[in-house]
Structures are given as structure tokens and as C-alpha cells.
Image: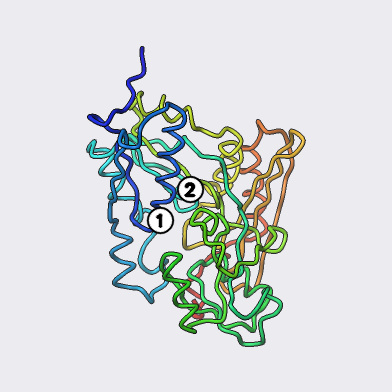
């Protein structure tokens, strides 16, 4: 069967949230498809969809994300639009995606992964160890809070939600002395002027799938599947399969401090995983190395060890008043 390419008269509709970073990721997806099939820009239509999470985040700007809802808050309307046929594909930050997709949808295309590292952002200090005792740190990430307090329990961590620009403005306004962003977002937004110091994964293990763009489609849409196959990055997919297997086995969500990273070197896959108490009082890490083909099973195996070592009640953040 001959592939029917999108045209200006019948464009491929790409769904996305409306933040500058989400749009940058949608534009990158469009450009890769244009290059793969030598298509004009108007053969694609970027469709911005406001999600429940976007609306709630604006209303409840000072509440922790875990109190508002789970990751699905930021995908529900986009996925409903795709199931209705209003859009053909949806572009996401994979780290924000639940492990399971709604019936009828698949997340099986990934672009080449960007820098996986977290970035320390401060106009005054260069690194975590430079912060004075009791310094105020702004972040909405439960993982980053736990990792930070595990190393520096003296710090005062405050809620710091919003897109990249919003968080940088809060920092400039003096709400906190530092914050954290993903290096991938800084790079994709071409924000070279941001005072960002990359943090080695050995020092702060990143979120599962950090730095990876995932593209979702309808399971029965063969045209979208064939188009996306041309831009799919196999190594990124292999690494994410191991990481997301770890996350699934841990039953992870945005309420749980979990970190993980899969890396491929010399034909071997190394998977690192970490779970933390929400107050940072304890961190448990595990890793495994094996063949690339064993990534999914390695994810389950590492998760089993972490769960065994953590014991019951380890992730019960509701008992931690500080959060």
C-alpha cells in the first residue's frame, strides 16, 4: 500500500500543550517529518490543546502537583481529541507520561534523546554544595526535593511550579535562591543565557525518560505509524523501555520519588534506579548491566530489589507533614 503523505489541503494534525517547551517539541517533530519526506511546513497543523492540568495549575499555582492530581491531568484532553480524530498525533515529554496509555492509543515513537541531566539554576551560586545553610530552594518535583534533602536536610524547599519561564521569573523575583530545570528543556528553548550548571547523574539521578520526546498515535492509524517510523530513534526507545519497565514495576507516579537512567555502552545496557522517602531521610539505589535485549526484564528485576529493600510504607508521602 502506498503511503499517503500529508499536504497543505490535508495536513497532519499535531496535538500539543501550549507552553513554549511543548511547542518547541512539536516544532521539532514537524521539522523531522518535513525532512524525512521533503514536505512543506503547511503540510502540518500544530493544534494547541489546553488540558485540565494546565487549568488547575493556573488556579492552584501554589499547591504541590501531587495534591492536584496525577500525570494524566496533562494528557487527558489531548488523548480525547486524538480518539475523536481531531488530531492525528500528539507530542509529549515522555517523563510526564503515564506508563499505560488509554485503550486505542499507543506511545511507540521517540525522537533522539537530549541531555538527560538536571540543571542547578541560581544567579548567585554555582552548585548545591555552595548554598548556605537554610537557603530557600524552589522546585515542584518530589524527586528533586527528596534527592536534595537527602544530601542537604538543612535546606528549605518551597513549591515552585509553572513552565520554564514562570520558574525563572520566580527566581528573579527572589522567591528562592535556586531552582532546578532539565538541561533538555534549556537546550530545546535555546536559553544559553540561563545560569545553568549541569548536574552529573552520579550526583542526581534524573527522572525516568527525562530528555525524551514521545509521540502518541491511534493504534489503528497505519498512515501515522508509517510516517512516524521514519523519525523513530531505536536507541532512545530501547533505553526508555528499560526505564519505563522499572517505573511500571514500582507502580510509579508523580507522587513517588523515583529516579532512573538506562545507558548503552559497548553493546551493553546499564540501568540505574533509585527510590527515596519523600522527606529525603532515606535513599535506596540499585543497578544492573546486561544485554540490550534484556532491558525490559532488567527494569523489573531492579524494581523488585528496590521494593524488597524499601519495605512497606516507604512511599507514604501523606505521613510527611513537610510535603
When the figure is inspected, residue 265 is found, relative to residue 21, above or below; the finding is above
Q: How many marks?
A: 2
Query: Who's the residue at 70% across and 60% down the image?
Result: 200
The percent position of residue 24, horizontal first and vertical second, equals: 43, 51
Query: Who's the residue at 35% across and 67% down the image?
Result: 68
Q: Residues within 10 Å of mark 2 (few under 14, many from 20)?
A: many
Kindly give the residue lying farthest to the right in the view shown: 266
Q: Which residue is mark 2?
A: 94
Q: Is residue 204 left or right of residue 319?
A: right
Q: Which mark is residue 265?
A: none
Q: Is residue 301 left or right of residue 138?
A: right
Residue 147's image quarter?
bottom right
Badge 1 element: helix
Kindly give the residue lying farthest to the top in the view shown: 1
Q: Which mark is residue 71?
A: 1
Q: Is residue 230 left or right of residue 130?
A: left
The percent position of residue 65, horizontal first and vertical second, equals: 41, 67
Mark nearest the camera among 2 and 1 is: 2
Query: Who's the residue at 46% across and 32% down the image?
Result: 35
Quadrant for the N terminus in the image:
top left
Camera-nearest residue between 14 and 322 = 14
When the figure is inspected, residue 7 is found, relative to residue 100, above or below; the finding is above
Amino acid at each position: 500500500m502506498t503511503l499517503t503523505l500529508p499536504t497543505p489541503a490535508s495536513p497532519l494534525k499535531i496535538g500539543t500543550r501550549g507552553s513554549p517547551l511543548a511547542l518547541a517539541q512539536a516544532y521539532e517533530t514537524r521539522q523531522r517529518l518535513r525532512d524525512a519526506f521533503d514536505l512543506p511546513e503547511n503540510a502540518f497543523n500544530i493544534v494547541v490543546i489546553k488540558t485540565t492540568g494546565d487549568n488547575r495549575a493556573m488556579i492552584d499555582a501554589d499547591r504541590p502537583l501531587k495534591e492536584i492530581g496525577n500525570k494524566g491531568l496533562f494528557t487527558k484532553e489531548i488523548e480525547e481529541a486524538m480518539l475523536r480524530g481531531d488530531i492525528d498525533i500528539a507530542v509529549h515529554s515522555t517523563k510526564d507520561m503515564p506508563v499505560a496509555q488509554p485503550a486505542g492509543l499507543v506511545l511507540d515513537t521517540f525522537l533522539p534523546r537530549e541531555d538527560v541531566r538536571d540543571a542547578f539554576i541560581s544567579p548567585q551560586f554555582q552548585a548545591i554544595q555552595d548554598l548556605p545553610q537554610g537557603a530557600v530552594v524552589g522546585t515542584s518535583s518530589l524527586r528533586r526535593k527528596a534527592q536534595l534533602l537527602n544530601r542537604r536536610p538543612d535546606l528549605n524547599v518551597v513549591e515552585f511550579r509553572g513552565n520554564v519561564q514562570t520558574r525563572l521569573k520566580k527566581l528573579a523575583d527572589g522567591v528562592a535562591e535556586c531552582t532546578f530545570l532539565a538541561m533538555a528543556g534549556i537546550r530545546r528553548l535555546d536559553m544559553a543565557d540561563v545560569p545553568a550548571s549541569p548536574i552529573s547523574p552520579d550526583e542526581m539521578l534524573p527522572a525516568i525518560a527525562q530528555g525524551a520526546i514521545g509521540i502518541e498515535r491511534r493504534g489503528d492509524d497505519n498512515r501515522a505509524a508509517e510516517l512516524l517510523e521514519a523519525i523513530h530513534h531505536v536507541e532512545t526507545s530501547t533505553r526508555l523501555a528499560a526505564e519505563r519497565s522499572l517505573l511500571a514495576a514500582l507502580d510509579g507516579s508523580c507522587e513517588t520519588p523515583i529516579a532512573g537512567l538506562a545507558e548503552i555502552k559497548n553493546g551493553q545496557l546499564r540501568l540505574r534506579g533509585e527510590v527515596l522517602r519523600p522527606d529525603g531521610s532515606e535513599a535506596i539505589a540499585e543497578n544492573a548491566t546486561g544485554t540490550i535485549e534484556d532491558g525490559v526484564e532488567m527494569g523489573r528485576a531492579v524494581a523488585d530489589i528496590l521494593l524488597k529493600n524499601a519495605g512497606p510504607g516507604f512511599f507514604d508521602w501523606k505521613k510527611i507533614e513537610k510535603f
